[in-house]
Amino acid sequence: MAYIKFDDSKVSKFVQANELPEMQALVTAADQELRNGTGAGADFRGWLTLPTDYDHEEFARIQKAAEKIQQDSDVLVVIGIGGSYLGAKMAVDFLNGSFYNSKPKSERRGVQVVFTGNSLSASYLKELQDFVGDRDFSINVISKSGTTTEPSIAFRIFKEKLIKKYGQEEASRRIYATTDAKNGALRQEVEANGYESFIIPDGVGGRFSVLTPVGLLPIAATGADLNELMHGAADAAAAYQDADLSKNDAYRYAALRNILYRKGYVTELIENYEPNLRMFAEWWKQLMGESEGKDQKGIYPSSANFTTDLHSLGQYIQEGLRNLFETVVKVTKPPYNVDIPMEKDNLDGLNYLKGQTLNEVNDKAYEGVVLAHNDGGVPVLTVEIPDESEYSLGYLIYFFEVAVGISGYLNGINPFNQPGVEAYKQNMFALLGKPGYEELAAKLKKEID
Ligand SMILES: O=P(O)(O)OC[C@H]1O[C@](O)(CO)[C@@H](O)[C@@H]1O
């Protein structure tokens, strides 16, 4: 039986029986492009084999570094943006729950892990500095280029704090840099100051890098089991190899979302019923959006957190513009369950829930929502994982990574580049007065005035 249960029964009202088989030839062609490297962006397929083909010496070094951090620090400050942030944050939340950082030390497997360098908010940076306060801390700065503005500024600020507290030598021992093997500003700084460093492999783009040191060091710092994470991803890599749509649910998901897209369902909402999967949605949005939104086409990836958003977005999903479809990531057995107390007076009328746990109530909400939204004209796909273990997360990550590779080729784009991200950066550099941008600065100034 498949480890991830993929349920597409709630798209049958919207997709004719012949449509999926008709996609098989295209999926087979997309599979060949992906596997044989004949598709666009082929140099960035390193993630395909990553779960089994990684640097084991470096993997062991990451675990050692995490142990050292756990011994000498209360907090690990992780600095990065985009693919150098979202995967790590998503995994830390998924595996450790919503209140991990607030738990007393004795109830945590690892150190507190906080994230910065993912915005230009001075207030956030200040609040985070105050949060770290006088406590012992280390830094994991993550940047392939080393020149991305947001993490570069945050790194300067936390590096200054680290040097003030420990002096240059000890500060250098508390900085872990995850960056390119040879190139970039951060690599230069590593060489100059002797920081311990980990490598972002060349063939793995930022949004596919969660199973590289980019994600692995912050995850390990929380005490999570990296071997199980990689094991889950490796088993998924083996499970999702067959191009046959009847045997490969990740490919089936890719094909169905393309069928829906061509009918006008141009927005996909990734949904969860567990708050610690909120960041999973953010990771998925980058994976899908940066991979597919190009050449003036692509599904717009959005998200909703249930049941919370049923009381805000629920109205729109039920009755708004009919261009939405939903993909629910469902957890069969969340880590905890809660009994609902019965009250003698039953003033709120809740005693009808007698004998039902909160997880059962949540499951009924899911079932009710799927039926209601389906009736309202919204196709719903469900990707169900058994639990919130490291193994399941590794499996799930790979499911969506391989699906977006196939999906991108089905839609005739290069799923592995992100040229559009540069546009705002160029303008920002010009407006900030960065040397080399004088001409653009003059042009923008005219437009602004
Ligand atoms: O790791 P870097 O070079 O700081 O880049 C950060 C992120 O910026 C992007 O290049 C564009 O958003 C992402 O793909 C990448 O993950």
Image: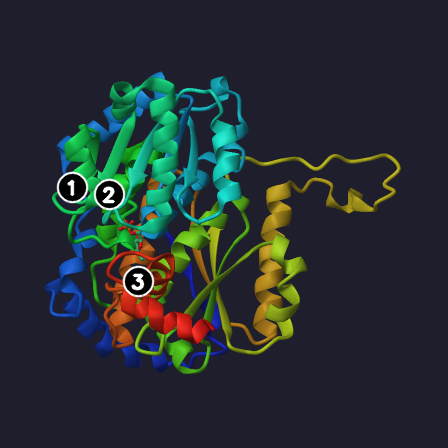
For the residue marked with disc 1, what is the amino acid? Tyr
**Residue placed under numbered mark 1 in the picture:** 54
For the residue marked with disc 2, what is the amino acid? Thr
Q: Helix or strand or loop: what does disc 3 sit on?
A: helix
> Could you tell which of marks 3 and 2 lies nearer the N-terminus?
2
- x and y, in percent, of residue 419 in the image: 27, 67
Residue at image position (34%, 57%) is 433
**Marks 1 & 2, CB-CB < 8 Å contact:** yes
Q: Is residue 96 visible?
A: yes
Left or right side of 167 for 126: right
Residue nearest the observer in this picture, 353 or 318: 318
Q: Helix or strand or loop: what does disc 2 sit on?
A: loop
> Could you tell which of marks 1 and 3 lies nearer the N-terminus?
1
- x and y, in percent, of residue 94 in the image: 44, 41
Which circle marks residue 19 in the picture?
none
Residue nearest the observer in this picture, 421 or 152: 152
Q: Helix or strand or loop: what does disc 1 sit on?
A: loop
The answer to which image quadrant residue 286 occupies is bottom left
Q: Nearer the viewer, mark 3 or mark 2?
A: 2
- x and y, in percent, of residue 258 in the image: 36, 75
Residue nearest the observer in this picture, 201 or 78: 78
The answer to whether mark 2 is within 8 Å of ligand 1 is no
**Residue placed under numbered mark 2 in the picture:** 212
> Could you tell which of marks 1 and 2 lies nearer the N-terminus?
1
Which circle marks residue 403 in the picture?
3
Q: How is the image coloured?
A: rainbow
